[in-house]
Amino acid sequence: MATIPCGEWPGTLRRRYNRAVDFPRTLRERRTRRHVSQLDLALRAGTTQRYLSFIESGRSVPGRNMVVRLAESLELPLRERNELLLAAGYAPAYPESSLDDPVLAPVRTAIDHILRGHLPYPALVVDRGGDLIAANTAFDLITEGAADELVGPGTNIYRLALHPDGLAPRILNLAEWARHILARLGHLEELRAELTGYVPELEPSAGQLGFAVPLRLRSSYGELRLMTTVTTFATAVDVTLAELKLEAFLPADPATAEALSAAAGAMACAVAGQEPGNM
């Protein structure tokens, strides 16, 4: 799966916000979900506990700046900050651009550069729901043998990982890895319920997992042992950009590093052999 050229990135659908929301209840739920007391939130937002109590009881209506300060103080994702503003009757503060919007062209270029720069190791970019946006060519080794409908731009990488027609039959430590995947899907209840049904009733091994849960995957180059890292745009002020995640795979042992390098070399030779003059 080659990296998607900048000009071919799929557009994102504008998501609708729920305007029929009770602001005091919404604020209270966001605060309690993060285990922040009224006093702590008031101090962070530069106001008083009494005034915050009035807001949460509906006795006071906060201004737009106060809503923004409360959302920032709770460290809400940009999407939830917009939802909080809408619930309070104000326009969203953060734009949500389409990935093919010209304003995000520098971002697409940067991501493509990062994906290529991570070679010969696999790397990909997904959105908030885990749908694939782009991947480098090394990701083909991860997806080999998976059903066509589970692979490619717009498909869900979590479904790919745990579906019986995806990676699951090749994952040697499926119990541990499945739990690792499912733990990341708290905000995607329907998907989590679906994928839970694919996971067999297996107990994680009692052995030492080490410092991280590796992905142990059978491949045409032998067993791969891979660690994963996730990178986000920490300073993003666009909802779409803030929700992108760049997931990179790294070899957990020398044998995996050699296998990935060999696979990349074979792919490069195959591509070179198709070029004019090398036929």
Image (cartoon, rainbow, N blue to C red):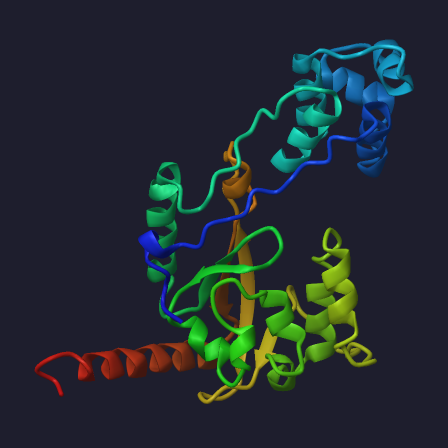
Residue at image location 83% in from the left, 38% down from the top: 33
Q: Which residue lies most toward the left here? A: 277
Which residue is found at the position 45% from the left and 79% from the top? 141
Q: Is residue 248 above or below residue 196?
A: above
Is residue 274 left or right of 125 when viewed as pictured?
A: left
Q: Quadrant of the C terminus?
A: bottom left
Q: Is residue 214 visible?
A: no
Residue 132: horizontal and vertical position, in percent?
A: 51, 61
Above or below residue 75? Residue 156 is below
Answer with the quarter of the image where residue 65 lies: top right
- Number of labels in the image equals 0
124 and 81: which is toward the camera: 81
Q: Position of residue 17 (x, y in %)?
A: 68, 36
Left or right: residue 50 versus residue 174 is right
Q: Is residue 278 above or below residue 210?
A: below
Q: Position of residue 244 (x, y in %)?
A: 52, 48
Query: Which residue appears at 40% of the width and 41% of the height?
Result: 101
